[in-house]
Amino acid sequence: MTDSTALSILRDEITVYPGPTGSKGHPSWVLHDPAPNQFFRLDWPTYEILCRWDYRSPELIVDAVNRETTLEITLEDVESVAVFLNTHCLVKRLDFADAMELARRKQASKKAWWLDLMHRYLFFRVPLINPDRFLERWLFIGIFLFSRGFTLTTGIVLLFSLIKVGQQWEVFQSTLLDTFSVKGFMTYAFALVSVKVFHEFGHGFMAKRYGCRVPVMGVAFLVMFPMPYTDTNEVWKISDRRKRLAVSTAGLRLELLVAVWATLLWVILPDGAIRSAVFFLASVSWVLSVLLNISPFMRFDGYFVLMDWLDYPNLHARSSALARWRIRRLLFGLDEPPPETLSLGFQRFLVVFAILTWTYRFILFIGIAILVYFKFTKVLGLLLFVVEIYWFILAPVIKEAKLWWERRAEIWAQLRTRATIMVTLGFLLVFVVPLPKPVTSEALMRPVRSTQLVVPEAARVKALAVSDGAEVVAGSQLVELVSPMLLLNQQMAAMRAETATRRHQAASLDKERAGSPRLANDQRESRLAELERANREVTKLSHIAPYHGTFRLNNPDIAEGEWLAKDTVVGTLVDADSGMEVLTWIDESAIDRVSIGAKATFFSQSYGDVISGRVVEIGSDAINSLSFPAMASVFGGDILAREKAGELIPERATYRVVVELDGTGRNRVTSVHYGRLKIGARPASLAGQYLRIVVLSLIRELNP
């Protein structure tokens, strides 16, 4: 900047307000641009420079500031202020060159149509109303709701309501469970909208109370998810930090007021529509206030409260810049100054906060992307999934990587860079090199041949021919049951068969009086088949050993004369000499690494033994359902499965694997035992495994 440089003139509508005092006692000011309704925090040197901006000469401004204040500024300080004013269009454009500069900026700010479409899909705002006059007219309501007396009364009501809810806790729980229906969720949606309206008017009333204009209320859409918003930018005019905090917390406070008073109404009202309505209001308000609004990692109330409490504007952007600086210093040892001068303790806090914010947003945006994928058709859902992953997660990483590339010469000159590269290559080596890794899964050990004795119909134990654990030979009587229902069915079937047989005989002798012989014969055959089925059911009551083995009762305390329900398993006949096998189920991500003949080791939970074996069978097709419930995740097992129509359906393609165990003696078992199975598998890299999971998922999802 030279002596002849004439500074541009500030726009007439630009105003400057006193700002809050900094944590170290430094004064600050706030510059307001009313056109976009933007606010900028100014430090002391910048304010003094702007106060003398009409001098139009950098040298005169520097001389005046240094002479009239205790500050010592330079021409570079004035130049940085000029750049700031021009960048944010805070100066007048008086000549053709200025107009061309504005046109150039406008053209540069234009995005490609697809980029603009992507941005509008990810986030856009819809202004709905200008609530300023309404808030002015009804401000007395807001003043009353936030008054000290009403707040104290609400606290007393809260204690009373919590005590009464505790006394009716079972009723509260049952009411909550009853709301888990389509109608209940629709009512929750209506209650959510109502509570969010209260929330936004809370911000509006409090901002109006302190003299701020509230020009807009509307709905913002984050990945098509609606979130109401209120424009309270003018709170930056307020120099008192406590008042700004009051505006930031006003929505949360009003939600809590709704929750407390709705809870009180639920406690005192009789059953009916009104009580149900206030229950929805209370539950939604409590959940939103506690779980959503207090989070400082997104731009919800918790973020603005923390920002005002710390008196640190643009907390997310500035903490992220500081964290990126710290990462560059850690990885490459770059000796560059931090983005801003802060105390060491506050620096560490901001870096940790930025990392927590990145982690929270990563998990949140991954979840949103998956939700969007399943919400739309497969092709469109996959496209939108990729868009969100790129915009929210990959784009910031790519931006930082570009900065590293631009500074590659400086980065490569640092010794720390070489150490970082070596460590990174070591991790990549572990990631891509195939390593020996066994396939481990939950498994069960059982005899190769076993038979369960199941009660076909409710029956009484007539005789227990053998005791629990007894050795039996083929043809031995095991258990004899008596079922009055099956015996009655047998008798009725016998009577109907006898009647049908007589009618058939009569029809053969006298066709005119007894009817058609063919029809009579069909009826006789039907009744005889019915009798045969009844006889088979009765025969099932007498259990005979089909082979030599060991008989084990499921309930050793069972006694003669005891009644058993239908489908009760009385016991199991086990042929221990047939050998043992282990069954396990392996999902598609690892099944290709398992082969016939592979060595396996079973770790029994019951015996504590370690038994070796080998793989003898691998299912060629994925199973349709899981026949052992203990293996399913819904019952504490490892296999992710869901219940559908009484069956357990695996969520991923899962294959049955059979292992034949070695040895006898202690390895003889007469029941099912659970444990863990380790199978020696082909080496595989972590990268290959993850790539296989991704490819299989894409194939599964894209196939109709």
Image: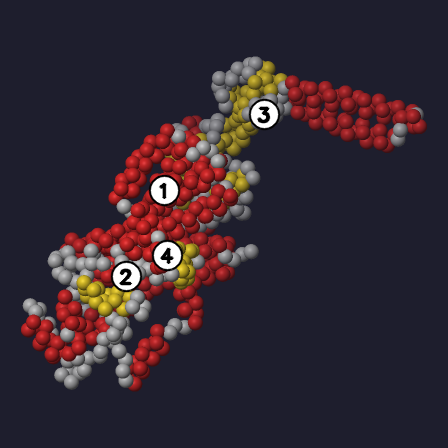
Mark 2 and mark 4 residues within 8 Å of each other at the beta carbon: no
Tell me the residue that label 3 is attached to. Answer: 566
Q: Earlier in the sequence, mark 2 or mark 4?
A: 4
Can you give x and y, in whole percent of width and height, for residue 383 in the image? Answer: 46, 62
Q: How far is mark 2 from mark 1, CA to CA?
A: 29 Å
Front residue of this view, candidates 351 and 13: 13
Q: How far is mark 1 from mark 4, CA to CA?
A: 24 Å
Q: How far is mark 2 from mark 4, CA to CA?
A: 17 Å
Residue at 44%, 58% in the rendered image: 224
Residue at 60%, 20% in the rendered image: 459
- Determine if residue 387 is in view: no
SS for tag 4? Answer: helix
Can you give x and y, in whole percent of width and height, for residue 315 in the image? Answer: 25, 58
Query: Does 297 appear above or below 36?
Result: above
Q: Is residue 619 left or right of 421 when viewed as pictured?
A: right
SS for tag 3? Answer: loop
SS for tag 1? Answer: helix
Q: Earlier in the sequence, mark 1 or mark 3?
A: 1
Task: Specify the quadrant of the image occupied by residue 32.
Answer: bottom left
Q: Earlier in the sequence, mark 2 or mark 1?
A: 2
Can you give x and y, in whole percent of width and height, for residue 593 in the image? Answer: 44, 49
- Local crowd size for mark 2, using a 10 Å CA cut-off: few (<14), some (14–19), many (≥20): many
Query: Does 80 appear above or below 22?
Result: below
Task: Specify the quadrant of the image occupied by residue 645.
Answer: top right
Tell me the residue that label 1 is attached to. Answer: 259
Residue at 14%, 66% in the rendered image: 44
Q: Is residue 385 left or right of 83 when viewed as pictured?
A: right
Query: Does 533 appear above or below 201?
Result: above
- Find residue 134 and name its label: 4
